[in-house]
Amino acid sequence: MKKVAITGNIGSGKSWVCELFRQRLDIPVYNSDDAAKRMYFEPDAREKLVKRFGKSIYLSDSEIDRKYLADLVFHDEMAQRDLEGILYPALFVDFRRWMERQNAPYVLFESALVFEKRLEKRFDAVVMVSASEQTRLRRAMFRDHCDEATVRARMAKQWPEEGKRLLADYVIWHEKDDEDEALWEQIIKVNESVSS
């Protein structure tokens, strides 16, 4: 079974495109953001996290102190690397186990940071969902109920769209908010190519 990463910067419409793959083509989608949140509570990862960062990163058995952890890693690059060095291996073990339960020609691994985290070599192909900056800004502001400056600050932490499009095996342009024929045609082309 092929492994395909699907990525896109904030406001690109990546999650909607994933939903179309899932609903209309029956392609399983692994949401790495949701899975990463679970990894904090996997026994092995939890033990390593407590050893590295202390018990204070957990508010309870089912909740981490996101602000405390963000403050720790935001100013300390080594802490960020250590956190990822604990979470990513656990995440990919979980992904592999999840994949074994799927029955499809390929699966999608949804992640905004495929290229930033140098994950592209783990996959048979990478799909980039893209849209104009104005469209991405508008979508993110609407979705997250925040102002333009906040969205732009988050955009600045991601690699530029142009560079990611050059690195991707497939690019899906998603400018309109709703499903349209052009978007669906692009999804079909990617599906046919990846499935063959």
Image (cartoon, rainbow, N blue to C red):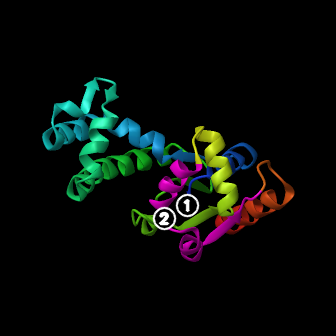
State the quadrant of the C terminus. Answer: bottom right
Residue drawn 34% across and 24% down?
Answer: 62
| Secondary structure type for disc 1 | strand
Residue drawn 66% across and 68% down?
Answer: 171
User: Residue 101: image x %, image y %?
Assistant: 51, 42
Write down the residue under mark 1. Answer: 4
State the quadrant of the N terminus. Answer: bottom right
User: Residue 188: image x %, image y %?
Assistant: 76, 61
Crowding near pointer 2: few (<14 within 10 Å), some, many (20+)? some
Q: Which of 192 and 60 is in front in this view?
A: 60
Dot 2 and dot 1 residues touching (CB under 8 Å): yes
Can residue 51 be seen by looking at this rendering? yes
Is 36 left, or right, of 146 in this rendering? left
Is 78 left, or right, of 28 in this rendering? left
Q: In which quarter of the image is residue 119?
A: bottom left
Q: Does the magenta stretch include residue 159?
A: yes
Write down the residue under mark 2. Answer: 123
Which amino acid lies under the numbered mark 2 shown in the image of this protein? Phe
* Range of residues picked out in magenta: 148-175
User: Does label 2 or label 1 sit earlier along the sequence?
Assistant: 1
191 to 144, vertically: above or below: below
Can residue 27 be seen by looking at this rendering? no
